[in-house]
Image: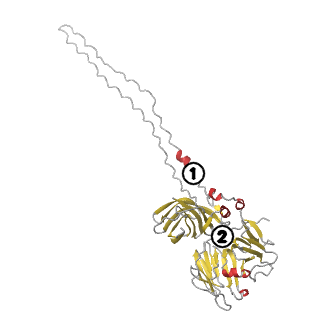
Amino acid sequence: MNHRLLPIAACLAFPLMGMGGAAHASTPGQSLGAVVGEATFVIGAASLLQEDGSSRALDRGAAVRVGDRIETKAGGHVHLRFVDGGRLSVRPASRLHIESYSHSAQQPQLGAIKFRLDEGVVRSITGSWGEAARERFRLNTPVAAIGVKGTDFVVRSDMERTAASVYTGAITLTPLANNGCGASVGPCISGHEKLLSDDMKGQILEYSRRDATPLLVVTDTVTRNARAGEITAARTEKSQTQALDDLRTEPTPVKSLTSEQKAVEVAVYTPPVAPVAPPPPPAPEPPVTVAPTPAPTPAPAPAPPPVAVQPPAPVQPPQVTQLAWARNPWTSRAEGDSFVVDYETALKSGWNRVIGNPSYALFQNPDAQGKLPQEGIVSFRLANASAQFYKDAQTAIESVAVQGGALQVDFGRSLFQTSLYMASKSVGSQNIQAAGNIGVTGQFTPTASNAGITGGLNASGTEAAYAFEKTLPQGSLSGVTLWGR
């Protein structure tokens, strides 16, 4: 049976700071569940539905409780951080219910962490409570039960199908139909479960209602056949052959005149002699008048030889050799994108992952040396860029042309500012504007922007890269950039 691979979207970058205050596990009988976490990142439209029936917009810093439902609209995106350090990313067009979040070191059998994903995409990173009681952690979807074993995983689900991918650790996925798994916690063992671990590279677990058991599905043939070291070759700049050919075209020279100059004849005019009269004596004979010799007509000067106009030398884009972007398995390749590699290739290359966002991860060459300059203002040039328009969380429907941009870094004050311009039929003209601080490791921290920005500088400050996500009324823009000097 052929199964269509469902794209999964997830978040690779979560805030790492600790919670500002303590929270407690839920207590039965409360009208509202106990506070168990907070929203650390919110973009787009997201709402919080509480057990008492109230509903409000979800803002950054808002507390989340047991019993709360998190809903995101198209373009909405929420990060949650829980009291035990657990983290959850709720992607656009998703609905998540926090059914339980409790722990007891003395009586671990009374604790439970349980989520229900009714629709959409989430990524979960287990905290200390989940690590201590892995047999009490569960995420249910409408069709499947997912038990985790201290892990970092991604799930996409709707009413008919569930697909899951693992970064670290392992999960078990079990069909919910007729096995009593819905009310339990932890892994569900029914004889129809399937295991997926982080050493099963390039695969996801997929289950639909019409299947008897979950299926292991290869995410990408290219991923499986990628070889180490391909990351450098895949970063090839966009072809400039046609542009150079156009610039080499010279104007056709004007031919010089080749006809010989004709000689000009000298004309002499002699009037007739007057007749001699009979006596009286003849009148004196008039003098012979010679017509003046006209000056010769000057020959036209030969045309000067044509001056060949040399075309301007083409402006080469900067070379970026220390940084590279990799797309996650669920991220589609943008049309014309020749510099972003797949995630598996990046891992095999031995390069170091430094940062990422829901769609892409930034890698740096481990041989990169140097340190950031302490002074000077540098304007970087755009080396490569790629962008796509997403109408919902799962499907990129159109490539977006990046038309240009600018990036300026003030090393003395550890500041950056950037702009990027792009357009497509669906989104029209769009721009990215951001400014902010630069950390000691070169990471960008925006303080003002119209989009989510994730990126930074290489070790020596000679190259830069950032990924962006911008929420639009009709969907979202997502893409990556590389910059050099």
* Residue 332 rendering spot, x and y as whole percentages: 66, 63
Residue marked by disc 2: 9
Residue 258's disc is none
Mark 1 lies on a secondary structure that is: loop
Residue marked by disc 1: 240
* Residue 206 rendering spot, x and y as whole percentages: 75, 70
Residue at x 35% of width, y 27% of height: 297
Name the amino acid, label 2. Answer: Ala
For the question of whether residue 315 can be seen, the reply is: yes
* Residue 73 rendering spot, x and y as whole percentages: 62, 75
Name the amino acid, label 1. Answer: Gln
Mark 2 lies on a secondary structure that is: loop
Q: Is residue 374 left or right of residue 11?
A: left
Q: Is residue 188 left or right of residue 130?
A: right
Q: Give yes or no for contact between labels 2 and 1 (Cβ–Cβ under 8 Å).
A: no
3D distance between C-alphas at marks 2 and 1: 33 Å
* Residue 400 rendering spot, x and y as whole percentages: 59, 61
Where on the picture, by quarter, is residue 270?
top left
Mark sitting earlier along the chain (2/1):
2
The residue furthest bottom is: 29
Colour option used: secondary structure
In the image shown, does 344 or 393 lie closer to the viewer? Answer: 344
Q: Is residue 291 left or right of residue 404?
A: left
- The correct choice, above or below, for 451 with respect to 187 in the image is above
Residue at x 66% of width, y 70% of height: 9
The residue furthest top is: 279
The residue furthest right is: 191
